Image (tube, coloured by chain):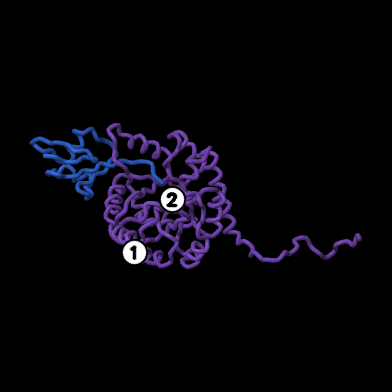
Chain colours: A purple, B blue
């Protein structure tokens, strides 16, 4: 596994904590997935202290925490949210989301770079939720990001890897940068494909939480990510257009 | 004076509380983070943060996220 800001993770699964049918199923899904990282957010605390109960549950999982700035639409809003998250979760890690379009939840990459620059200056270790655009990636790296998190498809869509060519190009252009495919994963095959392409991790949430059996899907995702990672390391064969017999031709009997 | 706490308008009477006193009086405890007028206020500074007319206070806590 590759390092993320000096931290080596046990596997390539980062799992979200939202939309599960119940806290108990969330916990079971995490245990089944053996996810190395849990993503969390900050929201207004209610009178009943719901946030405290949730936080106790997550802490007991014993996984690394990656807070997000989900729902932020400006650099300033994202920076303030990140500052609040650092205090609450006691980590310099921040999944930086600055949303630019309400229908696709596509990141506003200009505000993203602006926020990444400022947060890096303030000592954060930024995981920027970005597109597969090469120039945006370069600007984010110039801003101090040491990890990139390109989308597979719009958040919650389950469409998989919408632009495999773009992701492959990004991976090839920056071979030494740790990269996580974040968002859009719907099936284990999508997650496996991302790992086969050489990505270092996959961040997903809805695909597990909204499955009919989240615990079983969590297990399936874990195995797919392991399979994709092993396949990438095993140096897959080159595809070819024409058939090539795998059984030796030499020595075949003439039985006509 | 009027302030807004997590989107709800509150009327405060003198002596006006500091931020940490407002949080305690409003029943907030545990793991929370605060901002006043969209500016982060670290926990260590809440006791020295006075409140003013029209202040918008946000109190956030851990929540599910993807």
- What secondary structure is found at the residue carrying circle 2? loop
Disc 1 from disc 2: Cα separation: 24 Å
Residue pointed to by mark 1? A143
Residue plotted at (23% across, 32% down) = B27
Subunit under mark 2: A
Subunit under mark 1: A
In this orientation, does residue A133 appear? yes
Name the side, left or right, on which A69 lies relative to B16: right
**Place of residue B15 in the rendered image (x, y in percent of width and height, measured from the top left):** 8, 36
Residue pointed to by mark 2? A155
**Place of residue A94 in the rendered image (x, y in percent of width and height, measured from the top left):** 35, 52
Residue A233 vs residue A83, the one in the foreground: A83
Residue plotted at (37% across, 63% down) = A140
Residue plotted at (32% across, 44% down) = A42
**Place of residue A134 in the rendered image (x, y in percent of width and height, measured from the top left):** 43, 66
In the image as oriented, which residue stretches furthest toward the front?
A103
Q: Are marks 1 and 2 in contact (CB under 8 Å)?
A: no
């Amino acid at each position: 596994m590759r390092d993320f800001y000096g931290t080596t993770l046990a596997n390539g699964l980062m799992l979200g904590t939202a939309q599960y049918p119940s806290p108990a199923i969330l916990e079971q899904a995490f245990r089944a997935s053996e996810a190395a990282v849990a993503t969390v957010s900050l929201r207004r605390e209610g009178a009943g202290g719901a946030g405290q109960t949730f936080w106790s549950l997550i802490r007991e999982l014993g996984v690394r925490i990656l807070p997000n700035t989900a729902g932020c639409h400006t650099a300033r809003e994202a920076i303030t949210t990140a500052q609040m998250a650092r205090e609450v979760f006691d980590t310099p890690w921040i999944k930086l989301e600055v949303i630019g379009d309400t229908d696709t939840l596509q990141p506003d990459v200009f505000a993203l770079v602006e926020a990444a620059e400022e947060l890096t200056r303030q000592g954060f270790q930024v995981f920027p939720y970005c597109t597969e655009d090469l120039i945006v990636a370069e600007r984010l790296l110039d801003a101090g990001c040491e990890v990139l998190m390109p989308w597979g498809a719009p958040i919650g869509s389950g469409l998989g890897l919408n632009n495999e060519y773009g992701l492959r190009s990004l991976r090839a252009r920056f071979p030494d940068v740790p990269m996580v495919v974040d968002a859009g994963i719907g099936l284990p095959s999508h997650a496996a494909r991302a790992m086969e392409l050489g990505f270092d991790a996959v961040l997903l949430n809805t695909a597990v939480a909204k499955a009919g059996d989240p615990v079983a899907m969590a297990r399936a995702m874990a195995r797919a990510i392991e399979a994709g990672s092993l396949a990438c390391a095993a140096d897959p064969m080159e595809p070819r257009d024409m058939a090539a017999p795998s059984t030796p031709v030499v020595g075949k009997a003439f039985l006509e | 004076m009027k302030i807004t706490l997590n989107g709800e308008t509150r009327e405060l009477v003198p002596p006006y509380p500091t931020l940490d006193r407002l949080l305690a009086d409003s029943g907030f405890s545990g793991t929370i983070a605060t901002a006043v007028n969209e500016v982060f206020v670290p926990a260590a500074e809440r006791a020295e943060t006075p409140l003013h007319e029209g202040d918008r206070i946000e109190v956030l806590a851990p929540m599910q996220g993807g």
